[in-house]
């Protein structure tokens, strides 16, 4: 019987001697997948494993999932109901404490930062609520509405909808995110015919603090909103109904700086299943097909959505990608997904990649390549909630950056971007540890949405924490896309963008700033993010 | 002078007192603090300080101060001189007084209260009014100044 340790040791030696070899990377990958402890022990015989969370991050005064703060908030309260939310807000306002509501802290950006009162909404304010049909206009299809508190996760909402024969219009790739947190930062799903989550919203119930430091509640809807003003006012005397397009759109993507969203009413659809195929191609094969793949998406068309993962480094002389195609189907669920590697993937993989990144980064492209190959699967049918989820618990210690660019001519842009990442690897030894993720989103109406008024490709770059020069690489990536392709940052992901770019990126910035002045008049919802963006300047 | 409700600052560490005072001074638009109380606590691990005070502003404006999110600026802050009342300007053979600038804030507060109800909608109408008033849109200014009721006020926003 072969000695497992020797196999690991010799595989590691072979790849270290020839780090560009996908065959040798395949052997290391297969052994690590089959025997994770053995792989870690073999790696440790060569060099110690790097800390999964670097000490400078671990030692920050406050962290929760991906949210790291350079200071401890003065107060942390998880409201259990609306009354407690309002009283907590009033107490914070009375004490001049700045206020920040977060979902569960999965955002990578400083939008959740505060020195004052932190409100993690996911803990207790997370219920699905009954729709009060008595206040709706008679023309409204209440059967396709769903209302829930701000802490409700995608999973909570799906668990409520699916047994009732309903589904979300779309969802982000991780069901542990709150809908409201994702929506507020411009989050999205996949589908060139589907806008980001903010486009699915029909009403937002918000509590804010007015210029007299008094907490006020309002429900904001589009001008032709779902509520009958007279009926609404009679039934909800303490809640002002504001039906105004500009304010509604500003609030839908507002990063929590216009008040605290208590609940949201969204449009939903009938339940459906997803047929999924994931196949590996040379990117040069997929590039000419991309316009057709986008045009084929939508109701009654061949595809629901696609996702493309591109390994930006050459392996075996070429740039490869995985094309994930999804179609709606009435078939019952069948089969299983293969390995899922987004956001660092399962533990064996992110431990493997982080070790090689620390000790022989030149092997990372080949390892990412074989991991991508392992994701291939055909004719898998999943329920929509599962099919639209990435499929793995996204708990790897990563940081991520995402940028929205116009989806037309995306193939040429990706060629250019691949050249950018290859150049950084060659000149600075700075790699990324995951494929580039391409997801397509329809144009949005919210003035601060990364998809504002243009069909958009969101290009995501997740990178394991501790990756050398990761932050510099992500910033250089942002700069590259901003300067050459008018790229806009995803507000929930790493964003070091200086404020002077804001107006050039967002032509209706003033529409947002109007609501900022009205709903946040004395700065109680300001934080490091609003400072960085210069909203109050 | 206008005195606002109590503000508190907190900090821990080697410069706890300095930090607590800085933390307390996060209000923008006040002229000083009254009845400053400092409370310092020490245990075996660290020193913490807490400060409380009542912010005040000279004059009669009760507008709520803005709470600053960022750090105290490291550079010296220039406090602008208070505007002095308009002075008569001599012209030609006689004398005249510079007409006072149109007070958009006051006119728009009145206008917004006429055209909307509910604190958010009133604040929104006031903000939109002020943006237009400050352009300046002379015809709009005249219209909102003369408006006496909801009908005449709403007519001002008709293009």
Image (cartoon, rainbow, N blue to C red):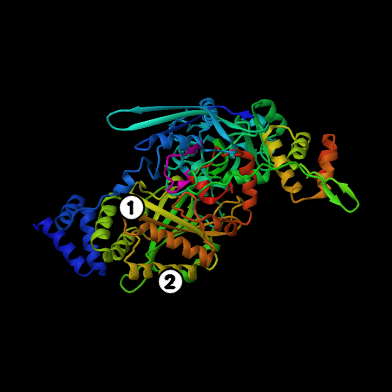
Percent of width and height locating residue A142: 62, 36
Residue that numbered label 2 is attached to: A285
Query: For the view shown, which residue lies furthest in the left direction?
Result: A1
Residue at image coords 34%, 64%: A430
Q: CA distance from mark 2 to mark 1?
A: 32 Å
SS for tag 2?
helix
* Along the viewing direction, whichever of B4 and A170 lies nearer the viewer: B4
Residue range corresponding to the magenta coloring: A98-111
- Position of residue A307 relative to residue A524, above or below, is below
Answer with left or right where residue B158 lies relative to residue B73: right
Query: For the view shown, which residue lies furthest in the front direction?
Result: B93
Q: Chain of mark 1?
A: A
Percent of width and height locating residue A156: 45, 37
- Position of residue B5 relative to residue A455, above or below, is above
Residue that numbered label 1 is attached to: A465
Q: Chain of mark 2?
A: A
Q: Residues within 10 Å of mark 1 (few under 14, many from 20)?
A: many
């Amino acid at each position: 019987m072969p000695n497992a340790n020797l196999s690991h040791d010799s595989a590691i030696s072979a790849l270290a001697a020839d780090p560009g070899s996908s065959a040798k990377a395949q052997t290391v990958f297969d052994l690590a997948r089959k025997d994770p402890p053995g792989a870690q022990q073999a790696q440790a015989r060569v060099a110690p494993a790097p800390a999964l969370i670097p000490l400078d991050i671990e030692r920050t005064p406050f962290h929760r999932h991906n949210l790291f703060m350079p200071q401890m908030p003065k107060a942390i309260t998880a409201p259990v109901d609306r009354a407690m939310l309002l009283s907590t807000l009033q107490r914070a306002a009375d004490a001049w404490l700045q206020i920040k509501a977060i979902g569960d802290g999965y955002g990578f950006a400083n939008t959740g930062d505060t020195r004052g009162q932190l409100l993690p909404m996911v803990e207790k304010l997370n219920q699905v609520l009954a729709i009060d049909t008595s206040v709706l206009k008679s023309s409204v299809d209440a059967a396709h509405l769903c209302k829930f508190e701000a802490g409700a996760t995608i999973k909570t909402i799906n668990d409520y909808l699916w047994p009732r024969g309903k589904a979300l219009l779309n969802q982000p790739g991780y069901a542990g995110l709150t809908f409201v947190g994702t929506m507020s930062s411009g989050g999205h799903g996949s589908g060139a015919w589907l806008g980001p989550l903010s486009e699915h919203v029909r009403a937002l119930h918000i509590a804010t603090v007015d210029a007299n430091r008094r907490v006020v509640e309002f429900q904001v809807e589009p001008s032709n909103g779902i509520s009958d003003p007279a009926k609404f006012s009679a039934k909800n005397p303490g809640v002002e109904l504001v039906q105004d397009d500009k304010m509604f759109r500003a609030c839908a993507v507002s990063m929590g700086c216009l008040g605290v969203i208590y609940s949201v009413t969204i449009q939903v659809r009938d339940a459906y299943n997803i047929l999924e195929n994931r196949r590996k191609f040379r990117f040069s094969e997929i590039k000419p097909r991309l316009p057709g793949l986008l045009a084929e998406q939508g109701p009654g068309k061949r595809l629901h959505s696609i996702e493309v993962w591109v390994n930006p480094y050459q392996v075996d002389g070429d740039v490869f990608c995985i094309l994930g195609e999804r179609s709606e189907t009435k078939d019952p669920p069948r089969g299983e997904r293969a390995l899922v590697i987004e956001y660092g993937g399962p533990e064996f993989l992110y431990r493997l990649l982080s070790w090689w990144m620390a000790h022989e980064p030149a092997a990372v492209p080949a390892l990412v390549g074989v991991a991508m190959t392992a994701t291939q699967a055909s004719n898998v049918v999943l329920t929509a909630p599962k099919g639209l989820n990435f499929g793995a618990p996204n708990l790897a210690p990563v940081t991520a950056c995402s940028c929205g660019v116009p989806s037309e001519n995306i193939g040429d842009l990706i060629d250019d971007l691949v050249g950018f990442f290859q150049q950084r690897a060659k000149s600075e030894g700075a790699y990324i540890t995951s494929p580039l993720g391409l997801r397509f989103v329809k144009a949005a109406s919210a003035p601060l949405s990364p998809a504002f008024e243009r069909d958009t490709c969101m290009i995501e770059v997740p990178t394991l924490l501790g990756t050398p020069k990761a932050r510099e690489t992500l910033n250089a990536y942002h700069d590259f896309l901003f300067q050459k392709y008018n790229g806009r940052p995803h507000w929930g992901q790493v964003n070091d963008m200086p404020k002077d770019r804001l107006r050039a990126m967002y032509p209706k910035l003033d529409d947002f700033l109007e609501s900022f002045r009205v709903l946040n008049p004395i700065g109680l919802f300001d934080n490091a993010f609003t400072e960085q963006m210069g909203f109050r300047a | 002078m206008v005195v606002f409700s109590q503000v508190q600052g907190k900090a821990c560490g080697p410069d706890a007192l300095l930090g607590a005072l800085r933390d307390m001074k996060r209000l923008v638009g006040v002229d000083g603090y009254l009845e400053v109380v400092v409370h310092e606590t020490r245990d075996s691990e660290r020193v913490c300080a807490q400060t409380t005070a009542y912010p005040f502003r000279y004059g009669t404006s009760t507008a709520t101060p803005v709470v600053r999110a960022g750090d105290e600026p490291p550079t010296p802050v220039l406090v602008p001189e208070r505007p002095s009342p308009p002075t008569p300007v001599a012209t030609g053979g006689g004398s005249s007084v510079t007409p006072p600038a149109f007070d958009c804030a006051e006119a728009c507060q009145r206008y917004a209260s006429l055209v909307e109800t509910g604190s958010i909608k009133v604040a929104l109408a006031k903000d939109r009014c002020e943006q237009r008033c400050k352009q300046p849109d002379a015809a709009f200014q005249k219209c909102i100044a003369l408006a006496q009721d909801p009908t005449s006020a709403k007519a001002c926003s008709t293009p």
